[in-house]
Image (cartoon, rainbow, N blue to C red):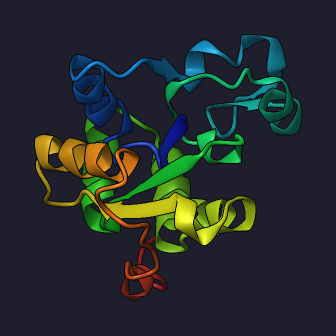
Amino acid sequence: MMVSITGIPGTGKTAVSSLLKEKGYSVTAQNDTIEKYILERDEERDAIVIDEDLWAEEFPVFDGIVEGHITHLLPSDRVIVLRCRPDVLEDRLRKRGYSNAKVKENVLAEALDTILIETVECHADDEILELDTTSAAVEETAAQIDDFIKGLTPAHFGDTDWSEFLGGDL
């Protein structure tokens, strides 16, 4: 079973995936797989632009977890979308040294449910689990994902609403 752990940068994908790797899951980082799909570097956004469609089409299906902010585009059997309250996400991204523009872009994408919407467009409802990591311990999130992969937790999404953060200083 291939599982995607996705979400805006700063929601906890890498931290959770590291714990799941310790539990015995095979984990692949999206960033380790995109080199040949890079189209350009967007200096203004401090981002790389890749051919997402070709990357997803050519990605080898495997038994394990792939983590990254576009892994929901893959033909995974399960997709976990990690979420974080925009004000907390902003703090996390600033601590990483992200530029103001990059912080704003990512916080706005989180407030607008961008990755969740894309996930729902690509996957069946029973394949998606949305988890709010704002105040959850990494261990708790990893346990919830483990239970979802094992079929002990049902698919669930759509309860997270960050719309109150829209219209402010985003």
Q: Is residue 14 above or below residue 33?
A: below
Q: Nearer the viewer, residue 135 or 56?
A: 56
Q: Is residue 75 above or below residue 136?
A: above
121 horizontally vs 78: left or right: right
Dividing the picture into quarters, in which one does residue 22 lie? top left
135 horizontally vs 113: left or right: left
Dividing the picture into quarters, in which one does residue 63 lie? top right
Q: Nearer the viewer, residue 139 or 23?
A: 23
54 horizontally vs 13: left or right: right
Dividing the picture into quarters, in which one does residue 35 lie? top right
Total tally of numbered discs in the picture: 0
Position in image of residue 18 (x %, y %): 28, 23
Position in image of residue 21 (x %, y %): 30, 20
Q: Residue at x 46, y 55 (%)?
A: 81
Q: Residue at x 13, y 60 (%)?
A: 135
Q: Nearer the viewer, residue 1 or 15?
A: 1
Q: Residue furthest front?
A: 151
Q: Is residue 156 above or below residue 75?
A: below
Position in image of residue 46 (x %, y %): 61, 32
Residue 96 visible? The answer is: no
Q: Residue at x 73, y 67 (%)?
A: 121
Indicate the quadrant containing the N terminus: top left, top right, bottom left or bottom right.
top right
Q: Residue at x 58, y 20 (%)?
A: 31
Position in image of residue 3 (x %, y %): 51, 39
Residue 13 visible? The answer is: yes
